[in-house]
Amino acid sequence: MEADLFVPVRLEGLPNGMILVEQPAKGIEIRVRGPESRIQSIQGGRIGYTLDMTAVRLGVQSIPIDPARIQLPMGVSIVGFSPKTLAIELARESRKALGVTVALSGEPPPGKEV
C-alpha cells in the first residue's frame, strides 16, 4: 500500500541571540509504502521531523531534508517527499528601550482598571 502523509517540522536549538526572520515550511509531504496496518499506525501525526538549529548561520539558508531522519515503523519506506530543502532566514536579535507615553481618555468599563 502507498499513502501520502504530512510530517510536521519542529525547530530545536535556535542559538541565543538569533531570531527567525523567515519560518521554514510547516511540514514535509511524504509518500510511503508498506503494509496497510503499519501505515495506519503512523497516520494522524505520530511522526515528525526535527530541524537542529544549533549549527545554522546568520542570513538566508537552504537546509536539505534528510528523509532517513523520519522514524517509520519497520517495513514502511519513503518513496518520495517534498520539499527537498527548507528555507530559513536568521538575524541577530536586537533590543532597544523606548520611552512610551500613554494618553488616557475616558473611563474604563465597570469592573475594569487601568
Image: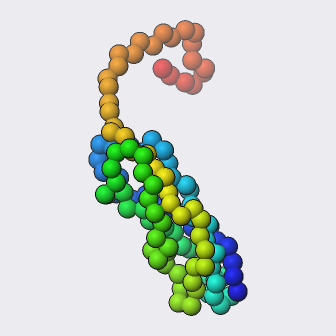
Comparing 113 with 59, the one in front is 59
Q: In the image, 93: left or right of 112?
A: left
Q: Quadrant of residue 38?
A: bottom right
Whole-percent x, y for residue 31 in the image = 64, 75
Quadrant in the picture for residue 101:
top left
**Residue at point 60%, 21% (across, down):** 110
Residue 5 to residue 35: above or below: above
Residue 72 higher or lower than 109, as above or below: below
Q: Residue furthest left?
A: 16
Name above or below for residue 12 compared with residue 67.
Answer: above
Residue 91 in the image: state x and y as whole percent. Answer: 37, 40
Number of marks in the image? 0
Image x and y of residue 64, in percent: 46, 63
- The residue located at (34%, 45%) in the rendering is 58
Q: Residue at x 32, y 33 (%)?
A: 94
Relative to residue 56, is residue 68 drawn left or right?
Answer: right
Residue 58 visible (yes or no): yes
Residue 51 lies in quadrant: bottom left
* Of 56 and 41, the residue lying toward us: 56
> How is the protein colored in the picture?
rainbow
Q: Quadrant of the N terminus?
A: bottom right
Q: Nearer the viewer, residue 38 or 104?
A: 38
> Which residue shows up at 50% across the image and 11% down it?
104
Residue 37 appears in the picture as rendered: no
Q: Give residue 72's position: percent from left, percent from top.
A: 53, 81
